Image: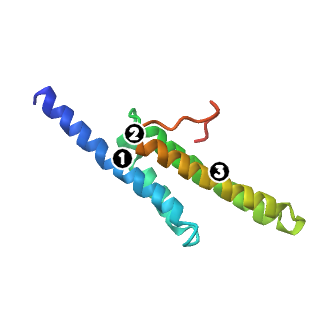
Amino acid sequence: MNTLTSHHKHESHLTDYDGLAHLMYLMQALSFLFGGIPFVTAVILNYLNRHHVQGTWLESHYTWQNETFWVGLVLVLIGVATLPFLIGFVILTSTVIWVIHRIIYGWIALNKSKEVIAFSKFRFL
């Protein structure tokens, strides 16, 4: 197989997973309307497909989406557990804002075909 053909196959391969990343951002956004179920579905799709994007610019998006899910889940659990102390409302509101920010920031970077750049070097997962 010549280099040009393999290059086109590789680009086509990434286009498929680029489209999947768009779908997962959409599912994350829709989770606010459908009680989080699309978010869970998106993270399952993410884990099933992330090995396909290892070593590419898309890997940062898959990692970003996973971090958003897991950190968001932990923060929601902490917020719910602390609702009787009223701080839970602050935690839950902050979590919603943080998750929305991450979806928008990541999706904009994906639309520009750019890696997601984390603000710190500390990475989850």
Q: Quadrant of residue 74?
A: bottom right
Q: Nearer the N terminus, badge 1 or badge 3?
A: 1
Q: CA distance from mark 1 to mark 3?
A: 23 Å
Q: Looking at numbered disc 1 in the image, what kind of residue is underneath it?
A: Asp
**In this view, which residue lies farthest toward the right?**
85
Left or right of residue 104, residue 90 in this image:
right
Taking depth in this image into account, of 23 and 62 the one nearest to the observer is: 23
Residue picked out by circle 1: 18
Marker disc for residue 113: 2
Left or right of residue 22, residue 64 in this image:
right
Q: Quadrant of residue 121?
A: top right
Q: Which residue is rendered at x = 31% and y = 42% of the image?
A: 14
The nearer-to-camera label among 3 and 2 is 2
Disc 3 residue crowd, few under 14, some 14–19, many 20+, Cα 10 Å = some
Q: Which residue is rendered at x = 61% and y = 50% of the image?
A: 101
Marker disc for residue 57: none
Q: Looking at numbered disc 3 in the image, what kind of residue is underneath it?
A: Val
Q: Which residue is rendered at x = 51% and y = 43% of the image?
A: 63
Disc 3 secondary structure class:
helix
Disc 1 secondary structure class:
helix
**In this view, which residue lies farthest toward the bottom?**
34
Left or right of residue 4, residue 38 in this image:
right
Residue 18 x %, y %: 36, 47
Q: Looking at numbered disc 2 in the image, what kind of residue is underneath it?
A: Ser
Reply above or below: 105 against 7. Answer: below
Q: CA distance from mark 3 to mark 2?
A: 25 Å
Is there a contact, CB below 8 Å, between mark 3 and mark 2? no
Residue picked out by circle 3: 71
